[in-house]
Image (cartoon, helix red, strand yellow):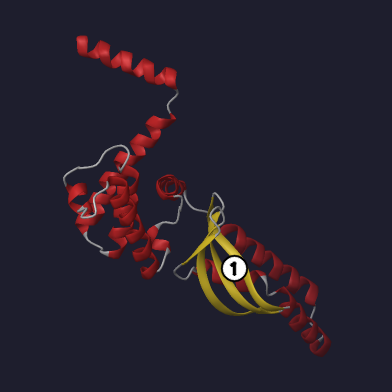
Amino acid sequence: MIGILDIISSKRVNKQAIVTKFLMVSIPLAHLGTYFIDNNQNAQYKAKKCRENIMKGYALTSFPFVAILLFFLWDKFDIPIIPIFTLYCMAIFLFSFFYNSDPSDEERRERLLYEKAITLNALPEYLIYEEQIKIRDTIIEKLKSNLKDPHLNWIENIKLNHYDYYSLPLYFALIGYHKEIENSNENKSLYLKLKSEYSLEVQKAKVPLHEKIKQEKQKKIGKKL
């Protein structure tokens, strides 16, 4: 088989994942690139190299090569190949099992916030610098359009809390990408602030109506007391 193959995907959340492309000539010969694939939108973005994908790609597709090598050794030196091949298969299985590529619970929660805000759930640090800039600038243009403000000073709006429930998701995603492009303690602090606020808003939206009414009644009783 000769061609380009998307051979390994990791960090999968809601049909979005990191995919590594290999040049294949029966076995993967060369790593061609890593991409973040959004199957919901049929879109892909250039991502930073994913070492675990590359290692798994070579390991999981090396069976034919190893089998041929062992057969050659058995033919020339009468080496017992079945126990060696069995140990090799067990090692590959254990490597794949314990070298976990699934996102952590915290990472999954953070990605779901991005997905709710801009449909793309890639964490900014997954992507290369150029893609980060493109996405950040797209969010800025969307904010300008939504707020009907062509001269929007979005960073000052975040610092001064000049945003509301409706604009918060875009501001959250925007500062998330901006902190990766311009890495500073201030940007990280602003991101953590908006992440906390947006997480609370998302949690509120999940509360059933009868629970919201109950909470409002409890607040009123508390004020009277």
Position above or below: 136 against 7:
above
Question: Relative to residue 183, is residue 119 depicted above or below?
Answer: above
Q: Which residue is mark 1?
A: 56
Residue 122: image location, x then y, percent: 44, 56
Quarter of the rendering occupied by the N terminus:
bottom right
**On screen, residue 15 above or below 27:** above
Number of marks in picture: 1
Q: Does 55 appear above or below 145?
A: below
Residue 217: quadrant of the picture: top left
Q: Quadrant of the C terminus?
A: top left
Tell me the crowding category of disc 1: few under 14, some 14 to 19, or many 20 or more residues within 10 angstroms, Cα based: some
Label 1, secondary structure: give it. Answer: helix
Q: Who's the residue at 71% across and 67% down the image?
A: 89
**Left or right: where 152 falls relative to 42:** left
Residue 150, percent from left and from top = 24, 54
Residue 164 shows up from this direction: yes
Do we see residue 101 in this rendering?
no
- Which residue is painted at 41% across and 19% down in the image? 211
Which amino acid type is shown beneath numbered disc 1?
Lys
| Residue 96 picture quarter | bottom right
Q: Position of residue 25 (x, y in %)?
A: 69, 81
Q: Position of residue 170 (x, y in %)?
A: 33, 48
Nearer-the-camera pick, 26 or 104: 26
Foreground of the two, 51 or 41:
41
Q: Is residue 211 left or right of residue 216?
A: right
Q: Residue furthest bottom?
A: 76
Residue drawn at 38 percent across, 62 percent down: 125
- The answer to whether residue 52 is left or right of residue 87 is left
